[in-house]
Image: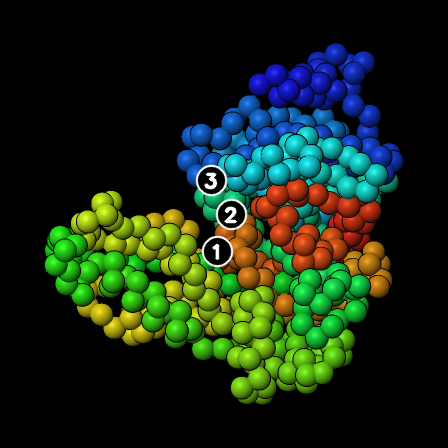
């Protein structure tokens, strides 16, 4: 398309020209950092379920873009390319006896949902910058995180900083489709080398900014007026199950109640009516204790002692799907397929059930529980092909990694209260921690301020980040790298 080729050409003049006169300047000002984020969004590193369909040129451009924009980083750190587009940077520490720190990021972004292109006030790959925001796919998830870390590393290395601990920075290129060719391959390589990390920091929980938001538009219950910097200390597992039934097909004029559609519909209804029991895990208990001080009754009392709140917990969970997800293994039917003619009872029906597993539960236990609930030999419940992940262990809150995150928050967002919590989504750090490479804690954070409305922009329409938050994100990672590498 015309616009695209003009964009590309413009970009290639700025960054990819071999002519030395047009070489990009090293980042010195806030403006240049914001420009770099904007330019990174213009590179369409769009995830594809079929890896052979990714736009290799765009992913290649992203690799070259980083090389061009961050010369000092590329002079100071070693770089390996894995599966062509995933990157593993290593910043050698001065003290080889200390275990290294791993920063996890990804360069791919989800596609724009077909049919919603026109709803974007700025083109999804425009990287438009206005008075307050940088706009486009990846502004939140997560070109901003990758670029903020690069800015932090570039600036620290320019100032002559050398870490005590070795810092690894891994940028996967297929996180949004499971990380099989990116993070999983990098993790395999590191495992073969016998690398063990002190801790890892990955994308995750933002700073919840409910302040001054109207009641129906808040993320947290209990009228919290203070900003809350959530720090994920554990991550839920992920399982897709195929729920299916096969029966004799027949004519709809003389129906039998035993039909494949009825079987699967009934199974899904039973699963909805018999949710997994509420269980208060360690991260949620810790979150409750810290949040309770900031809440109004009755939530202050419920959150202060979440394990003991009895019947109040299911009531509170019913009111908030976010809280519900923190308290139990959840199930959501996401695909339902059956039938192709209005007067034929089909011989098979199939649904996909997306399950998010609470730490402490397991894929096996989930299957057992659901089979018991459905209790129908005609219905098969089997793991679907694709990404199935056990939940993580629970990371400590008295570790150097956790302390580094807290002190970085205190430094950069002094008004926000750091609070441990449970990460309900999945991300690339799974590949490192599930292989036992992380010794003393994986932490999931996203150091930007989010309202409920902002959270809907992730993977949604009109994704954007405030310039101020992005600049603070750079400061956050500068602090984190300095703190974590010294501890
Ligand atoms: Zn992401």
x and y, in percent, of residue 480 in the image: 75, 54
Earlier residue among tags 2 and 1: 2
- Quadrant position of the N terminus in the picture: top right
**Does the residue at mark 2 contact the one at mark 1 (Cβ under 8 Å)?**
yes
What is the x, y in percent for residue 430?
52, 55
**Secondary structure under the numbered disc 2 in the rendered image:** helix
Classify mark 3 as within 8 Å of ligand 1 or not, answering yes or no: no
Given residues 234 and 451, the one toward you in this image is: 451
Sequence-wise first label, 3 or 1? 3
Residue furthest out toward the front: 253
The residue drawn where x is 79% and y is 16% is: 22
Q: How far apart are marks 3 and 2 (CA)?
A: 10 Å
Find disc 1 in the rendering and name its residue: 435
Q: Residues within 10 Å of mark 2 (few under 14, many from 20)?
A: many
Q: How far across and down, in percent of the image, does residue 62 sit?
A: 63, 30
x 64%, y 83%: residue:
302
Q: Nearer the viewer, residue 14 or 225?
A: 225
Q: Quadrant of residue 21?
A: top right
Q: Residue 187 got which mark?
A: 2
Q: Nearer the viewer, residue 154 or 417?
A: 417
- Find out if the beta carbon at label 2 lies less than 8 Å from the nearest ligand 1 atom: no
**Residue corresponding to mark 3:** 181
Q: Which structural element holds mark 1? A: loop
Q: Position of residue 173 (x, y in %)?
A: 55, 38
Q: Which residue is at 34% across, 49% downward?
A: 385
Above or below — where is 27 with respect to 447? above
Front one among 147 and 341: 341
Q: Do the residues labelled 3 and 1 touch (CB within 8 Å)?
A: no
* Inter-mark Cα distance, 2 to 1: 8 Å
> Mark 1 Cα within 10 Å, few/some/many (few <14, many 20+)?
few
The number of numbered badges drawn on the structure is 3
């Amino acid at each position: 398309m015309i616009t695209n080729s003009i964009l590309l050409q413009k970009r290639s003049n700025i960054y990819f020209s071999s002519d030395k006169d047009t070489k990009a300047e090293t980042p010195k000002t806030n403006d240049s950092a914001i420009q770099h984020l904007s330019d990174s969004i213009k590179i369409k590193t769009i995830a594809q379920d079929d890896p052979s369909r990714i736009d290799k040129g765009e992913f290649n451009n992203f690799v070259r873009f980083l090389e061009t924009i961050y010369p000092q980083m590329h002079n100071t750190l070693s770089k390996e390319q894995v599966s062509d587009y995933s990157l593993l940077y290593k910043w050698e520490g001065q003290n080889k006896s200390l275990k290294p720190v791993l920063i996890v990021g990804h360069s791919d972004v989800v596609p724009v949902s077909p049919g919603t292109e026109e709803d974007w006030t700025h083109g999804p790959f425009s990287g438009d910058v206005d008075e307050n925001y940088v706009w486009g796919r990846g502004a939140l998830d997560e070109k901003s995180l990758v670029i903020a870390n690069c800015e932090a590393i570039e600036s620290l290395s320019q100032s002559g900083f050398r870490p005590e601990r070795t810092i690894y920075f891994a940028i996967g290129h297929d996180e949004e489709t499971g990380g099989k060719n990116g993070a999983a391959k990098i993790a395999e390589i590191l495992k073969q080398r016998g690398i063990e990390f002190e801790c890892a920091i990955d994308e995750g929980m933002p700073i919840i900014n409910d302040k001054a938001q109207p009641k129906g538009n808040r993320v947290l219950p209990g009228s919290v007026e203070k900003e809350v910097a959530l720090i994920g200390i554990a991550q839920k597992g992920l399982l897709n199950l195929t729920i299916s039934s096969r029966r004799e097909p027949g004519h709809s004029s003389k129906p039998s109640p035993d039909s494949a559609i009825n079987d699967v519909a009934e199974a899904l209804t039973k699963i909805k009516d018999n949710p997994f029991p509420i269980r208060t895990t360690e991260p949620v208990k810790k979150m409750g204790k810290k949040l309770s001080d900031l809440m109004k009754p009755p939530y202050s009392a419920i959150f202060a002692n979440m394990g003991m709140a009895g019947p109040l917990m299911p009531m509170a969970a019913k009111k908030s799907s976010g809280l519900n997800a923190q308290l139990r293994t959840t199930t959501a039917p996401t695909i339902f397929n059956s039938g192709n003619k209005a007067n034929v009872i089909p011989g098979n029906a199939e649904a996909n059930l997306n399950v998010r597993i609470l730490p402490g539960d397991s894929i096996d236990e989930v299957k057992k529980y659901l089979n018991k609930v459905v209790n129908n030999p005609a219905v098969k419940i089997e793991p679907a092909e694709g990404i199935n992940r056990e939940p993580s262990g629970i990371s400590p809150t008295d570790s150097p990694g956790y302390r580094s995150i807290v002190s970085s928050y205190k430094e950069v967002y002094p008004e926000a209260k750091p609070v441990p919590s449970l990460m309900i989504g999945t991300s690339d750090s799974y590949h490192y921690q599930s292989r036992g490479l992380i010794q003393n804690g994986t932490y999931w954070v996203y150091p930007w301020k989010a309202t409920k409305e902002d959270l809907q922009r992730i993977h949604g329409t009109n994704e954007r980040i405030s310039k101020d938050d992005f600049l603070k994100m750079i400061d956050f990672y500068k602090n984190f790298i300095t703190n974590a590498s010294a501890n």
